[in-house]
Amino acid sequence: MPQTRLTDRFGRTVNYVRLSVTDRCDFRCVYCMAEDMTFLPRQQVLTLEEIARLARNFVALGTEKIRLTGGEPLVRRDILELVREVGTYGLRDFAMTTNGSQLPTMAEPLRKAGLHRLNISLDSLDADKFRAITRTGNLSQVLDGIDAARDAGFRGIKLNTVVMKGRNDEEIPELIEFARQKQVDISFIEEMPLGEISEHDRGLALCTSEEVRDIIRRRHELIPATEDSGGPARYFRMPDSEVRVGFISPHSHNFCSTCNRVRVTVEGRLLLCLGNEHSVDLRRVLRGHPVTDDKLQEAIIKAMDLKPERHHFSSNGDVQILRFMNMTGG
Ligand code: SAM
Ligand code: SF4
Protein backbone atom coordinates (compact mmCIF):
# COMPACT_ATOMS: atom_id res chain seq x y z
CA MET A 1 0.00 0.00 0.00
CA PRO A 2 2.52 2.68 1.02
CA GLN A 3 3.66 4.83 -1.88
CA THR A 4 7.40 5.23 -2.08
CA ARG A 5 7.27 8.92 -2.85
CA LEU A 6 5.30 11.95 -1.76
CA THR A 7 4.36 14.17 -4.69
CA ASP A 8 2.19 17.27 -4.68
CA ARG A 9 -0.18 18.77 -7.29
CA PHE A 10 2.67 20.74 -8.86
CA GLY A 11 4.85 17.67 -9.43
CA ARG A 12 7.22 18.44 -6.58
CA THR A 13 8.58 15.46 -4.67
CA VAL A 14 8.72 15.88 -0.91
CA ASN A 15 11.66 14.00 0.57
CA TYR A 16 12.70 16.32 3.40
CA VAL A 17 10.85 16.67 6.71
CA ARG A 18 11.59 19.08 9.54
CA LEU A 19 10.27 17.81 12.84
CA SER A 20 9.85 20.20 15.73
CA VAL A 21 10.49 18.43 19.03
CA THR A 22 9.55 21.29 21.37
CA ASP A 23 8.19 24.84 21.29
CA ARG A 24 10.28 25.72 24.36
CA CYS A 25 13.64 27.41 24.39
CA ASP A 26 16.26 28.77 26.76
CA PHE A 27 16.68 31.86 24.51
CA ARG A 28 14.13 34.51 23.51
CA CYS A 29 15.59 35.77 20.22
CA VAL A 30 13.99 39.06 19.26
CA TYR A 31 13.02 37.92 15.73
CA CYS A 32 11.63 34.59 16.86
CA MET A 33 9.69 35.14 20.08
CA ALA A 34 7.95 37.75 22.15
CA GLU A 35 9.58 38.36 25.53
CA ASP A 36 6.71 36.74 27.39
CA MET A 37 5.80 33.51 25.72
CA THR A 38 3.19 30.99 26.73
CA PHE A 39 4.27 27.48 25.88
CA LEU A 40 2.07 24.51 25.10
CA PRO A 41 0.70 22.31 27.88
CA ARG A 42 2.30 18.88 27.91
CA GLN A 43 -0.72 16.90 26.68
CA GLN A 44 -0.78 18.92 23.46
CA VAL A 45 2.83 18.07 22.71
CA LEU A 46 3.69 14.88 20.84
CA THR A 47 5.54 12.28 22.87
CA LEU A 48 8.96 11.18 21.68
CA GLU A 49 7.38 7.87 20.64
CA GLU A 50 4.80 9.72 18.54
CA ILE A 51 7.52 11.82 16.90
CA ALA A 52 9.54 8.67 16.14
CA ARG A 53 6.46 7.00 14.68
CA LEU A 54 5.88 9.98 12.40
CA ALA A 55 9.52 9.92 11.33
CA ARG A 56 9.37 6.19 10.58
CA ASN A 57 6.27 6.61 8.43
CA PHE A 58 7.71 9.56 6.52
CA VAL A 59 10.76 7.41 5.80
CA ALA A 60 8.46 4.60 4.59
CA LEU A 61 7.02 7.19 2.16
CA GLY A 62 10.40 8.08 0.70
CA THR A 63 11.75 10.74 3.08
CA GLU A 64 15.54 10.83 2.83
CA LYS A 65 16.31 13.76 5.05
CA ILE A 66 15.06 14.67 8.51
CA ARG A 67 15.96 17.74 10.54
CA LEU A 68 15.05 17.98 14.23
CA THR A 69 14.32 21.51 15.32
CA GLY A 70 12.12 23.58 17.62
CA GLY A 71 12.09 25.73 19.77
CA GLU A 72 15.40 24.51 21.05
CA PRO A 73 15.60 20.74 20.44
CA LEU A 74 18.26 20.24 23.10
CA VAL A 75 15.99 21.43 25.92
CA ARG A 76 13.65 18.50 25.28
CA ARG A 77 14.29 15.83 27.89
CA ASP A 78 15.51 12.50 26.50
CA ILE A 79 16.18 14.00 23.07
CA LEU A 80 19.13 11.61 22.71
CA GLU A 81 16.73 8.66 22.75
CA LEU A 82 14.85 10.11 19.79
CA VAL A 83 18.10 10.80 17.93
CA ARG A 84 19.25 7.23 18.60
CA GLU A 85 15.94 5.82 17.30
CA VAL A 86 15.69 8.00 14.17
CA GLY A 87 19.39 7.32 13.57
CA THR A 88 18.48 3.70 12.80
CA TYR A 89 16.08 4.62 9.93
CA GLY A 90 18.79 4.70 7.26
CA LEU A 91 18.41 8.38 6.35
CA ARG A 92 20.71 9.89 3.73
CA ASP A 93 20.84 13.01 5.89
CA PHE A 94 19.95 13.43 9.56
CA ALA A 95 20.42 16.94 10.95
CA MET A 96 19.49 19.24 13.80
CA THR A 97 19.17 23.02 14.15
CA THR A 98 20.22 24.28 17.58
CA ASN A 99 21.12 27.51 19.34
CA GLY A 100 24.26 25.74 20.58
CA SER A 101 23.86 26.49 24.28
CA GLN A 102 23.79 22.81 25.29
CA LEU A 103 26.42 21.64 22.81
CA PRO A 104 29.39 21.79 25.19
CA THR A 105 28.01 18.62 26.81
CA MET A 106 25.67 17.36 24.09
CA ALA A 107 27.71 17.52 20.88
CA GLU A 108 29.56 14.26 21.31
CA PRO A 109 26.57 12.23 22.59
CA LEU A 110 24.53 13.53 19.61
CA ARG A 111 27.20 12.46 17.15
CA LYS A 112 27.46 9.05 18.82
CA ALA A 113 23.67 8.70 18.75
CA GLY A 114 23.77 8.93 14.95
CA LEU A 115 23.17 12.58 14.05
CA HIS A 116 25.03 13.55 10.85
CA ARG A 117 24.98 17.34 10.76
CA LEU A 118 24.35 20.42 12.87
CA ASN A 119 23.16 23.94 12.10
CA ILE A 120 24.09 26.30 14.91
CA SER A 121 22.58 29.77 15.19
CA LEU A 122 25.05 32.60 15.78
CA ASP A 123 23.95 36.20 15.26
CA SER A 124 26.81 38.07 16.90
CA LEU A 125 30.37 37.64 18.15
CA ASP A 126 29.98 40.48 20.64
CA ALA A 127 28.80 39.19 24.03
CA ASP A 128 26.59 42.21 24.73
CA LYS A 129 24.99 42.26 21.31
CA PHE A 130 24.52 38.51 21.48
CA ARG A 131 22.75 38.91 24.80
CA ALA A 132 20.59 41.74 23.43
CA ILE A 133 19.49 39.69 20.40
CA THR A 134 18.88 36.43 22.26
CA ARG A 135 17.68 38.24 25.43
CA THR A 136 19.04 35.42 27.65
CA GLY A 137 21.91 33.82 25.73
CA ASN A 138 25.54 33.53 26.79
CA LEU A 139 27.94 33.88 23.86
CA SER A 140 30.88 32.03 25.40
CA GLN A 141 28.70 28.97 26.04
CA VAL A 142 27.68 28.90 22.36
CA LEU A 143 31.28 29.40 21.17
CA ASP A 144 32.33 26.47 23.38
CA GLY A 145 29.45 24.54 21.86
CA ILE A 146 30.72 25.24 18.34
CA ASP A 147 34.17 23.96 19.33
CA ALA A 148 32.65 20.85 20.92
CA ALA A 149 30.69 20.19 17.72
CA ARG A 150 33.88 20.50 15.64
CA ASP A 151 35.69 18.09 17.94
CA ALA A 152 32.83 15.59 17.78
CA GLY A 153 33.40 15.03 14.04
CA PHE A 154 30.03 15.79 12.45
CA ARG A 155 29.74 15.41 8.66
CA GLY A 156 28.91 19.07 8.44
CA ILE A 157 28.43 22.12 10.63
CA LYS A 158 26.78 25.31 9.44
CA LEU A 159 26.25 28.57 11.25
CA ASN A 160 22.95 30.43 10.75
CA THR A 161 22.85 34.20 11.10
CA VAL A 162 19.67 36.26 10.87
CA VAL A 163 20.84 39.67 9.69
CA MET A 164 19.13 42.78 11.04
CA LYS A 165 20.02 46.33 10.04
CA GLY A 166 21.53 48.33 12.87
CA ARG A 167 21.79 45.19 14.98
CA ASN A 168 24.39 42.86 13.53
CA ASP A 169 24.84 43.86 9.87
CA GLU A 170 28.16 45.50 10.75
CA GLU A 171 29.45 42.16 12.02
CA ILE A 172 29.09 40.35 8.71
CA PRO A 173 32.86 40.55 7.90
CA GLU A 174 33.79 39.24 11.37
CA LEU A 175 31.29 36.41 11.11
CA ILE A 176 32.77 35.42 7.74
CA GLU A 177 36.29 35.43 9.19
CA PHE A 178 35.07 33.36 12.15
CA ALA A 179 33.52 30.76 9.82
CA ARG A 180 36.73 30.61 7.76
CA GLN A 181 38.87 30.23 10.86
CA LYS A 182 36.64 27.49 12.31
CA GLN A 183 36.20 25.84 8.91
CA VAL A 184 32.42 25.75 9.14
CA ASP A 185 29.84 26.89 6.58
CA ILE A 186 27.70 29.94 7.25
CA SER A 187 24.28 31.06 6.00
CA PHE A 188 22.83 34.53 6.25
CA ILE A 189 19.06 34.62 6.65
CA GLU A 190 16.57 37.34 5.80
CA GLU A 191 14.19 37.84 8.70
CA MET A 192 10.75 36.40 8.00
CA PRO A 193 7.43 37.82 9.21
CA LEU A 194 6.48 34.88 11.43
CA GLY A 195 4.56 35.87 14.55
CA GLU A 196 3.77 39.36 15.76
CA ILE A 197 6.60 41.07 17.61
CA SER A 198 6.83 44.58 19.04
CA GLU A 199 10.56 44.65 19.81
CA HIS A 200 11.52 45.98 16.36
CA ASP A 201 10.05 46.80 12.98
CA ARG A 202 10.82 43.84 10.74
CA GLY A 203 10.40 45.97 7.63
CA LEU A 204 13.01 48.50 8.74
CA ALA A 205 15.41 45.83 10.01
CA LEU A 206 15.33 43.76 6.82
CA CYS A 207 18.79 43.35 5.36
CA THR A 208 18.46 41.62 2.01
CA SER A 209 20.79 38.85 0.88
CA GLU A 210 21.89 41.12 -1.95
CA GLU A 211 23.05 43.71 0.59
CA VAL A 212 24.86 41.04 2.62
CA ARG A 213 26.60 39.74 -0.52
CA ASP A 214 27.76 43.27 -1.39
CA ILE A 215 29.33 43.63 2.05
CA ILE A 216 31.15 40.29 1.77
CA ARG A 217 32.35 41.05 -1.76
CA ARG A 218 34.32 44.03 -0.46
CA ARG A 219 36.77 41.46 0.95
CA HIS A 220 36.08 38.16 -0.80
CA GLU A 221 35.13 36.98 -4.23
CA LEU A 222 31.97 34.86 -4.09
CA ILE A 223 31.77 32.07 -6.63
CA PRO A 224 28.34 30.44 -7.05
CA ALA A 225 28.47 26.83 -5.86
CA THR A 226 26.71 24.21 -7.91
CA GLU A 227 25.01 22.35 -5.07
CA ASP A 228 21.27 22.83 -4.77
CA SER A 229 19.51 21.90 -1.55
CA GLY A 230 16.08 22.22 -3.19
CA GLY A 231 15.55 24.87 -0.56
CA PRO A 232 15.66 28.60 -0.18
CA ALA A 233 19.44 28.76 0.22
CA ARG A 234 21.87 29.81 -2.51
CA TYR A 235 25.48 28.82 -1.88
CA PHE A 236 28.79 30.44 -2.79
CA ARG A 237 32.45 29.66 -2.18
CA MET A 238 35.45 31.90 -1.72
CA PRO A 239 38.49 31.15 -3.93
CA ASP A 240 40.81 30.48 -0.99
CA SER A 241 38.56 28.47 1.34
CA GLU A 242 36.44 25.32 1.48
CA VAL A 243 33.83 27.17 3.51
CA ARG A 244 30.45 27.66 1.83
CA VAL A 245 28.51 30.87 2.28
CA GLY A 246 24.74 30.52 1.97
CA PHE A 247 21.97 33.08 1.61
CA ILE A 248 18.46 32.24 2.67
CA SER A 249 16.28 34.79 0.98
CA PRO A 250 12.56 34.25 1.46
CA HIS A 251 11.91 37.85 0.38
CA SER A 252 14.11 38.21 -2.64
CA HIS A 253 14.39 34.69 -4.04
CA ASN A 254 11.36 32.68 -4.92
CA PHE A 255 12.46 29.12 -4.26
CA CYS A 256 8.99 27.61 -4.18
CA SER A 257 9.12 25.80 -7.54
CA THR A 258 11.77 23.40 -6.23
CA CYS A 259 10.47 23.13 -2.66
CA ASN A 260 10.98 19.57 -1.40
CA ARG A 261 10.08 19.94 2.25
CA VAL A 262 7.31 19.93 4.82
CA ARG A 263 7.32 20.60 8.55
CA VAL A 264 5.60 19.01 11.52
CA THR A 265 4.99 21.17 14.59
CA VAL A 266 5.39 19.69 18.04
CA GLU A 267 1.59 19.54 18.27
CA GLY A 268 1.63 17.23 15.26
CA ARG A 269 0.39 19.79 12.75
CA LEU A 270 1.80 19.00 9.30
CA LEU A 271 2.65 22.35 7.69
CA LEU A 272 2.84 22.19 3.94
CA CYS A 273 4.51 25.59 3.52
CA LEU A 274 6.48 27.89 5.81
CA GLY A 275 4.68 30.95 4.46
CA ASN A 276 1.08 29.68 4.45
CA GLU A 277 -1.33 28.39 7.06
CA HIS A 278 -2.26 25.15 5.21
CA SER A 279 -1.94 22.27 7.64
CA VAL A 280 -3.20 18.81 8.59
CA ASP A 281 -3.66 17.55 12.14
CA LEU A 282 -1.58 14.38 12.35
CA ARG A 283 -1.89 14.23 16.14
CA ARG A 284 -5.57 13.41 15.71
CA VAL A 285 -4.58 10.48 13.50
CA LEU A 286 -1.79 9.43 15.87
CA ARG A 287 -4.15 9.47 18.86
CA GLY A 288 -7.16 7.98 17.05
CA HIS A 289 -8.39 4.43 17.65
CA PRO A 290 -7.13 2.26 16.23
CA VAL A 291 -4.06 4.01 14.94
CA THR A 292 -2.26 2.14 12.20
CA ASP A 293 0.75 3.06 10.10
CA ASP A 294 -1.44 2.70 6.99
CA LYS A 295 -3.85 5.34 8.28
CA LEU A 296 -1.02 7.67 9.13
CA GLN A 297 0.57 7.23 5.71
CA GLU A 298 -2.76 7.79 3.97
CA ALA A 299 -3.20 11.07 5.85
CA ILE A 300 0.31 12.19 4.90
CA ILE A 301 -0.16 11.28 1.22
CA LYS A 302 -3.51 13.09 1.11
CA ALA A 303 -2.02 16.18 2.76
CA MET A 304 0.32 16.67 -0.20
CA ASP A 305 -2.68 17.97 -2.20
CA LEU A 306 -2.77 20.95 0.15
CA LYS A 307 0.80 22.07 -0.51
CA PRO A 308 0.42 25.57 -1.97
CA GLU A 309 2.28 26.62 -5.07
CA ARG A 310 4.20 29.42 -3.37
CA HIS A 311 4.56 31.60 -0.32
CA HIS A 312 3.68 35.29 -0.26
CA PHE A 313 6.00 37.06 2.18
CA SER A 314 6.18 40.78 1.63
CA SER A 315 9.04 42.97 2.76
CA ASN A 316 7.03 45.74 4.36
CA GLY A 317 7.21 44.03 7.72
CA ASP A 318 3.54 43.08 7.84
CA VAL A 319 2.76 39.90 9.71
CA GLN A 320 1.23 37.40 7.39
CA ILE A 321 1.68 34.32 9.48
CA LEU A 322 0.55 34.45 13.06
CA ARG A 323 2.57 31.46 14.25
CA PHE A 324 5.95 32.24 15.72
CA MET A 325 9.04 30.56 14.31
CA ASN A 326 9.47 28.52 17.50
CA MET A 327 6.03 27.02 16.78
CA THR A 328 6.81 26.51 13.12
CA GLY A 329 10.02 24.58 13.45
CA GLY A 330 12.67 26.63 11.70
N1 SAM B 1 16.50 27.02 18.53
C1 SAM B 1 17.18 26.55 17.37
C2 SAM B 1 18.03 27.64 16.75
O1 SAM B 1 17.86 28.80 17.11
O2 SAM B 1 18.85 27.31 15.90
C3 SAM B 1 16.28 25.93 16.34
C4 SAM B 1 14.97 26.59 16.06
S1 SAM B 1 15.07 28.22 15.34
C5 SAM B 1 13.37 28.64 15.18
C6 SAM B 1 15.64 27.81 13.71
C7 SAM B 1 16.22 28.94 12.91
O3 SAM B 1 15.20 29.85 12.59
C8 SAM B 1 17.32 29.72 13.62
O4 SAM B 1 18.47 29.73 12.81
C9 SAM B 1 16.73 31.08 13.76
O5 SAM B 1 17.73 32.06 13.66
C10 SAM B 1 15.74 31.15 12.62
N2 SAM B 1 14.64 32.09 12.82
C11 SAM B 1 13.82 32.22 13.88
N3 SAM B 1 12.89 33.19 13.66
C12 SAM B 1 13.14 33.68 12.44
C13 SAM B 1 12.53 34.69 11.63
N4 SAM B 1 11.48 35.39 12.05
N5 SAM B 1 13.04 34.90 10.39
C14 SAM B 1 14.10 34.20 9.95
N6 SAM B 1 14.71 33.23 10.65
C15 SAM B 1 14.26 32.97 11.88
FE1 SF4 C 1 15.04 29.86 20.65
FE2 SF4 C 1 15.97 29.30 18.23
FE3 SF4 C 1 13.85 30.90 18.52
FE4 SF4 C 1 16.21 31.77 19.28
S1 SF4 C 1 15.62 31.22 17.19
S2 SF4 C 1 14.29 31.93 20.48
S3 SF4 C 1 17.18 29.96 20.01
S4 SF4 C 1 13.93 28.76 19.03
Image (tube, rainbow, N blue to C red):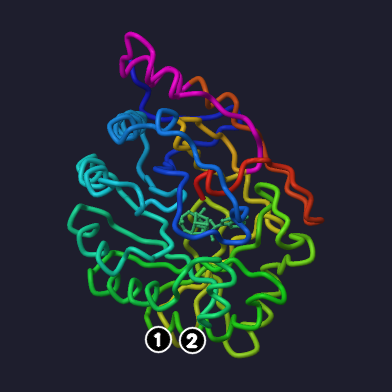
The correct choice, above or below, for 215 with respect to 194 in the image is: below
Residue at 50%, 20% in the rendered image: 302
The correct choice, above or below, for 228 with respect to 184 in the image is: above
- SS class, disc 1: helix
In the image, what residue type sits under mark 1? Gln
Residue at 71%, 56% in the rendered image: 251
Cβ of mark 1 under 8 Å from ligand 1: the answer is no
The correct choice, above or below, for 325 with respect to 63 in the image is: below
Kindly identify which residue carries mark 2.
177
CB under 8 Å between discs 2 and 1: yes
Q: The N terminus appears in which quarter of the rendering?
A: top left
Front residue (pair 142, 149): 142
User: Gap in Å between the C-alphas at discs 2 and 1?
Assistant: 6 Å
> Can you give x and y, in whole percent of width and height, for residue 295 in the image?
38, 14
Question: In the image, 5: left or right of 196?
Answer: left
Front residue (pair 176, 329): 329
The image shows a total of numbered marks equal to: 2
The correct choice, above or below, for 245 with respect to 290 in the image is: below
> Can you give x and y, in whole percent of width and height, for residue 239 in the image?
49, 85
Q: Write down the region rendered in magenta.
A: 275-301
In the image, what residue type sits under mark 2? Glu
- Quadrant of the rendered structure where residue 323 is? top right
Residue at 56%, 32% in the rendered image: 11
Question: In the image, 195: left or right of 236?
Answer: right
Q: What crowding class fits label 1: few (fewer than 14 Cα within 10 Å), some (14-19), or many (20 or more)?
A: few
Q: What crowding class fits label 2: few (fewer than 14 Cα within 10 Å), some (14-19), or many (20 or more)?
A: few
Question: In the displayed image of the protein, which residue is found farthest to the bottom?
Answer: 219
> Can you give x and y, in whole percent of width and height, for residue 131 in the image?
53, 73
Question: In the image, 290: left or right of 218?
Answer: left
- SS class, disc 2: helix
Kindly identify which residue carries mark 1.
181
